[in-house]
Amino acid sequence: MGWIALRMLTGDKVKYYGLIFGIAFSTLLIAQQSTLFVNLMLRASAAVWDVTDADIWVMDSRAEFVDGTKPLPSTDLYRVRGVPGVAWAVPNLRQGATVRTAAGELEQVTVVGLDDATLIGLPPRILRGSLGDLSAPDSLFIDDVGSRKLFPNADPVGQEIELNDRRAVIRGVVDANPSFTSGVLLYTQYSNALNYVPGTRNRMTFVLARAAEAKDAPATARRIEAATGLRARTQSEFARDSIYYVAANTGIPINFGLTVLLGFIVGVAIVGLTFSLFIRDNIKQFGALKAIGVTNAKIRGMVALQAGWIGFIGYGIGIGLATAFIVIGGNNSDTFKGFYVPWQVLVGVGIAVLLMVFGTGFIALLKVLRTEPAEVFR
Amino acid sequence: MRDPAISVRGIVKDFGNGETRVRALHGIDIDVFPGELTYLVGESGSGKTTLISIVAGILYPTQGSVRVFGSEIYDLSKNALVLFRLANIGFIFQQYNLIPTLTAAENASVPLVAAGMKRGQAVERARSALDKLNIGQLAERLPRQMSGGQQQRVAIARALVHDPRLIVCDEPTAALDASSGRRVMDLLREVAIQPDRAVIIVTHDNRVFDLADRILEIEDGRMVGDRRPDKTKPLQQELQH
């Protein structure tokens, strides 16, 4: 009976395309908004994932996320190094500053101070320049998105900027994940960074450490906390903390959540209404099938197949459009740099579509099942 | 004496409950024999559609029993009754109830497909059924591309395609003009009547009464007439006696 069910469905072009449009539109809205939400949230942890060598971040005991910390005294670096299980530990500075560009514009930037000797904390992919270039006086590396923001039509390498009233020269470009605020990131040696950012007694933002055994990172972090009273988080823990902080302290989850909910409701409304019209228009035919001897189980199978079919096609179109939006956006705009469609979004939207089509299909089916075959004689 | 194909005994049917209860059938007893074209006639509201629905196994009676080719159909489980209908009963509806998005051949193949036959084989058999009804050339047409008479022939093909032992027709000519109705009934008589098959037609179309082998009359839920028309006389004249 499957092909009969599909022919009944696809033969009524207006309703068929209406159903597919409803699901595709809903899928697009839910998938696109969920993807943007997830990627924006991931940006809250971008700075953490850009540091690939260290697996433990140590910070002030009250720090909650990567851009919300209180500087530490430099002696804390040695306290961390003294904890058993710590292979090495280096200082890291992360602080806001103001840049005046050659065009005279002011731009808020984040200065990241890297351990002078090891440059740990620099994103692994260098697009322009080499590690040695950071050793030159007043040298900075800039992130690729920031370079296009500060120097839209010029080669950033060799450009001089005024950073908190001090001269600095861009000598390289790195491929960094844009931060949540999409601010410009400037990387320099720790000793240089101390000169660029306003001075207070304590200057060090983080201690970046590595456990002697990678698998022992969580236990080592707990030991650091116990020994120093500081907050020590593994890379994944700190990334998660940063995401939770942004999620809990901004209206982003509510706004995106409302849009996703709206997409679902619109989908249910369109699909439910159209499906119910489709069933109503075919109720005599379903009644005739029941009279002829088609069992309720087969009728259920027919409606399930119809629901599954429109769900599959609508989902495919919606996900295709959402993915195209993200891929094209990512390739052509710094706004979407690094954005991708997580598999969890695909699964989540798939579940939403299943609920949508089978929920509305079930309600429409009740009407068919309640139809007495004798009604075709009335 | 021949065994009846259908034995209806003491059928009572009530609709509604309590004060709103209406008795549509008051203890109907009839036998229908194979190899005959049996008409069930009566005014609107007389109970003929209710009775034929009960005989066809699609409406449970309040009281009484219905035996179709030896099976007490209302003793069967619901699912078994559905399968009994699929195997033994062909339906022809007043409004045809063809699926508008299927071709004539596909529509006629529905009972075979429902019984589990593969699509290609079922459609091929349906084409043969359409050929027998002289509409083989319309096999690929959709219902909306056919006249009412042609659609009713497709419905007849659908009723006959699986070779059922009982054919049940509800006002098969009501939606047709006089000549189309006559042709459809002629055709039905020609292809449906078999020695081991019973055919019951509900109608109040007196233009085709002369084609019946037997006429059962129902009035206000009671059987009031059972006659075998003398085909040498105009039927209306006979019914008035």
Image (cartoon, grey):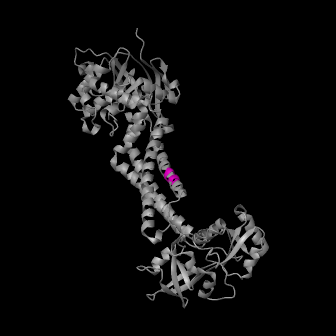
Q: Is residue A299 visible?
A: yes
Task: Say which quarter of the image contains residue B89.
Answer: top left
Give the residue drawn at x 57%, y 69%: A124
Q: Nearer the viewer, residue B36 or A184?
A: A184
* For residue A144, above or below residue A105: above
- Residue A352 highlighted magenta (yes or no): yes
Question: x and y percent of residue A224 in the render?
Answer: 75, 71
Q: Nearer the viewer, residue A102 or B183?
A: A102
Question: x and y percent of residue B192 in the render?
Answer: 32, 21
Main SS of the magenta segment?
helix
- Residue B184 highlighted magenta (yes or no): no
Furthest toward the left, the residue is: B179
Furthest toward the top, the residue is: B1
Give the residue drawn at x 53%, y 68%: A40
Assign the C terminus of chain A to one quadrant of the image.
Answer: top left
* For residue B9, above or below residue B146: above
Q: Which region shows up in magenta?
A: A350-354
Assign the N terminus of chain A to one quadrant of the image.
Answer: top left
Question: x and y percent of residue B185 in the render?
Answer: 27, 24
Q: Nearer the viewer, residue A206 or B83?
A: A206
* For residue B87, above or below residue B148: above
Question: x and y percent of residue A372 in the render?
Answer: 45, 36
